[in-house]
Image (tube, rainbow, N blue to C red):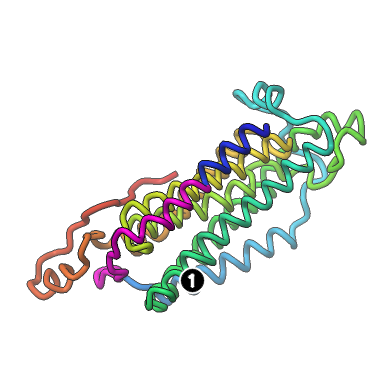
Amino acid sequence: MRRVVALCWATALAALWGAWSAPAQAAEPLVWNPAWPKFRPVEYAVTGVAGLASLGIYFGIPNASEPRWTGGILFDDAVRSGIRLHTRRTLGTARFTSDVAALATATWVVGLDSLVVPVVRGKPDIGAQLTLMDSEAFALATLFSNSMFKLIARARPSYVDCESDPYFDSLCHKNDTSSFPSGHATFVFTAAGLSCAHHLHLALYGNRTADVLACGGTIGFATLTASLRVFGDRHYVTDILAGALIGFGVGFGVPTLLHYGKAGSESSAQQAPQALASGAPAMPVGPTFAGTF
């Protein structure tokens, strides 16, 4: 476990270091393509309703008293048997580290990239747009996740063991039916999806290499967080995969479909006003997103 955690941390931190060292090589302007729609009034409403509904479901609807789905599927049991930690100390370490990694991912994506970087680069208006898109994606992703684990009520991997031995795990009978999908995985992969959408369409760090590395770094932190939930015996692998698909699909898909996908992310956004002035239709150039997860 130590080797896997060390490798994940090393990969993510290397990407973070590369992202922050690369901008010194060049300084592409941070500009908002005028063909991209800004946050609309309806999105404020959707974000508010989704956020309140998510909180209402989480706090207002009690968890199922008995699981509706118990046990693993596909490769769940084999993976759990192979990598699950066993002592309370190592389990606690894995769970605590997953929380730290999740917080680091959110701080990087929302606190640093969406708030600090645009302000430092003199573009607080772009920072406001990024923060609004982040809020919308997190509200929708958590709504999906909270609704699913309340409805599906899958038992935690340790549920059967805790039934026969209440001292099997320090968290026995705590949120027993909140396994699918993984909330941690949904959260961090939403952040990673947002990071990739923002960095692949905007020159946030002023350098293409730095922006690609930032996308990879947040995916590394998200993978670390999700992996530790399996090491810590709080989720099956399929819980993680479901959370990752929901999170990254919403995190990348929502801003891309509603904003960035409306026009190309040209290397020089100054071309957009010329195209609009000439009456030529805006054609997508660069990264685009289509389909559903």
Residue 76 picture location, percent across and down: 64, 27
Q: Residues within 10 Å of mark 1 (few under 14, many from 20)?
A: some
Seen as rendered, the residue at the extreme left is 278
Q: Quadrant of the N terminus?
A: top right
- Say which residue appears at 10% left-offset and 66% top-offset: 280
Does the magenta run of residues contain 189?
A: no
Q: Which residue is mark 1?
A: 116
From what the image shows, is residue 118 above or below residue 196? Answer: below
Q: Is residue 248 visible?
A: no
Residue 293 picture location, percent across and down: 45, 44
| Residue type at numbered disc 1 | Val
Q: Which residues are magenta?
A: 13-36
Residue 187 picture location, percent across and down: 58, 53
Does the magenta run of residues contain 17?
A: yes
Residue 261 picture location, percent across and down: 30, 58
Q: Secondary structure at mark 1?
A: helix
